[in-house]
Image (spheres, helix red, strand yellow):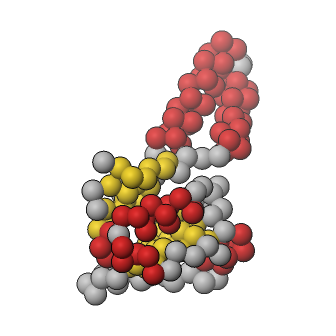
Amino acid sequence: MSTYRERLSPSLWIFLAIGLVIPASILVFAPISLVTGIIVAIVLYAGSAAILFFASPVLMIADGMFRAGKATIPLSFLRDPVALTGNSAVLARGQKLDARAWLCIRGWIQPVVKVTVHDPNDPVPYWLVSTRNPTELVAALNQQTPSLRNNPTVN
């Protein structure tokens, strides 16, 4: 049973931006047939929007595992979840980013959660994941594993 689930789907402005395929398709196909151009435009937009939505990673906590996209890690290996927003999130994704960190970040989602990996066999120091609900994700991680409750702060 899942205790937390979030799809990192694109923001509305991304779907509006891909709407530019509509006039482009009509322009390309209008000399052949305006009806064909409109049909192609609708199919291209719908296909692009569907790919963007269904290819979006999912964050999930279930059955003692934390899943972010295609990666999964047991909660027993995780420590110190920290919700980062604002400038702290920007720095965590940029200047303070460790090249060894595992990332599941999306440019259209500003807040991130940083979770330390405590596994001697794993070279990854931490996971950094985008989330629209950083405090809820930290709370769900803390609720699942008592060892995570070391530092559930929000910056």
153 relative position to 87: left or right? left
Residue 103 higher or lower than 91, as above or below: above
Q: Nearer the viewer, residue 120 or 103?
A: 120
Which residue is located at x 70 percent, y 14 percent? Answer: 34
What x and y, as percent, mark residue 146? 36, 73
Q: Nearer the viewer, residue 141 or 101?
A: 141
Count of residue discs: 0
Q: Quadrant of the C terminus?
A: bottom right
103 relative position to 13: left or right? left
Which residue is located at x 32 percent, y 55 percent? Answer: 62
Q: Nearer the viewer, residue 34 or 77?
A: 77
Which residue is located at x 45 percent, y 61 percent? Answer: 140
Residue 18 shows in the view: no
Q: Nearer the viewer, residue 52 or 126?
A: 126
What x and y, as percent, mark residue 102? 44, 72
Residue 50 higher or lower than 135, as above or below: above
Residue 149 higher or lower than 7, as above or below: below
What x and y, as percent, mark residue 8? 53, 51
Residue 94 higher or lower than 71, as above or below: below
Residue 139 shows in the view: yes
Which residue is located at x 41 percent, y 59 percent? Answer: 68
Q: Residue furthest bottom?
A: 120
Q: Quadrant of residue 96?
A: bottom right
What x and y, as percent, mark residue 127? 45, 73
73 relative position to 87: left or right? left
